[in-house]
Image (spheres, rainbow, N blue to C red):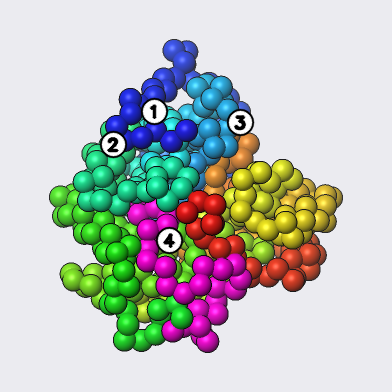
Amino acid sequence: MVVRLDDSQPVYSLPSLEIPDEEEDAPAPGLSLVRQLGSASRTKYNQQQLKRVVGALQLPEIIFGAAALSSIYNEDSHLSGFTPVRTVRLALRYGINAFDTSAYYQQSEIVLGTALKALETDFPRSSYKLMTKCGRYGSTRADFDYSPTTIRASVQRSLKRLNTTYLDAVYLHDVEFIATQVGARVAGDPTLALNEKKAEYGLVEGEEGKVWGEGDQKILDALAELRKMQDEGIVKAVGITGYPLPTLLRLALLALHTPPYKPLDVLLSYSHLMLQNTAFAEFAPHFRDRAKISQLLTASPLNMGLLTPKPPAWHPASQELRDAAKQASSTCAQWDGGLPNVAVGFSFRKANELSVPTVVGLSNPREVHENVRVWREICEGKEEKELERLAQEQEVLKVFDNLKGWSWASPPSKLL
């Protein structure tokens, strides 16, 4: 369950024994997420380094998706042991030094903050970036609160949970639940809003600063409160997240064309740069050139678990898309790592082409090693392996051919 702002907070303490440090806790040799500058070092793994960074926020190419450090994806027994801190430590040793979480992700902030506190000798606060979200505290629209008072209280709670005095980025979470509805809330191809349906979705030139209703004003007020905290030094970057790309673009333009006429610092999109749907690639130039956003991120290369052997029951995909995902999994049965491996590699390549980092959920050290292994394959581009991977991707893309670029309606009707 999501912990309400006024509820008592759960506590996650590490077992009293020393944190295990075994062979699986060491990075595998190979291409690094960081490039070495010299021999000076603070620790065995944390050498003086020139990071492979992306965008204005100087983020690593892989970002640790800390929703995995919650009961959304794992049992409490998993979260209360050493696995979370070992996972975080291994990620940091590899150079995955940025973390994405949210007040909505149940106990994620608490578990992550506990792990980082335990590792502060080797990895002080200055060695990593923390990004969280506020405004969403449950599944339905009634569980959202974008009032300035709540936004500030949420950020203050996140600071305590994460054991920090500042946050590198704070997003308004899932803005489509609050934004005034402009255009049809239907499933389909979101890129149509960039062309023949531009007027329907409020994206025509000259209307960028139009407040379409009460919801839009609530978002502007919430952003204003985050900007105040930015001026206070509590928040370094301000942004928004959500699913429907036309809504994200409209709100990004609204923020830019409303006093104080500043662009959003950062924007996070999910499930739109992966095997079945790459619509984010079409929107990225508009976010950058028209909305003037200097840092874009993409998340969920596995489409919130749909591109795995066991998709979650709560996933909003249509039955047709679920069936296609099941077929895609069978298509990858003989591939080392299966469909998840193919999907993550595809997203890493597309993200690299767009110069955006990818947020990937990491539950345990094995998943850290596996994601770095795939990232290395993509970056190294060894011809034989690359050709094999591209051929496997094409087989999967054929499965999704009739559903290519299809996005579900968000918010779903049942959550309104």
Stretch of the chain drawn in magenta? 170-199
Q: Secondary structure at mark 1?
A: helix
Q: Report, in whole angstroms, how far the alpha carbon at label 1 lies from the one at label 3.
A: 21 Å
The three-letter amino acid code for the residue at tag 1 is: Thr
User: Which circle's residue, 2 or 4, is located before the other in the chain?
Assistant: 2
* Residue identified by numbered label 3: 24
* Residue identified by numbered label 2: 157
Residue in the foreground of this view, choosing between 171 and 369: 171
Q: Report, in whole angstroms, how far the alpha carbon at label 3 lies from the one at label 4.
A: 41 Å
In this view, 179 is above or below 254? above
* Residue identified by numbered label 4: 176
The three-letter amino acid code for the residue at tag 3 is: Glu
The three-letter amino acid code for the residue at tag 2 is: Arg
Where is residue 12 shown, x and y percent of the image?
Answer: 42, 23
Residue drawn at the location 70% of the way across and 68% of the way down: 403
Mark 1 vs mark 3, foreground winner is 1
User: Which circle's residue, 1 or 3, is located before the other in the chain?
Assistant: 3
Residue in the foreground of this view, choosing between 408 and 374: 408
Instruction: Sort mark 4 into few (<14), some (14-19) or many (20+) by Cα contacts within 10 Å.
Output: many
Q: Report, in whole angstroms, how far the alpha carbon at label 2 lies from the one at label 4.
A: 24 Å
User: Which circle's residue, 4 or 1, is located before the other in the chain?
Assistant: 1
* Residue identified by numbered label 1: 114
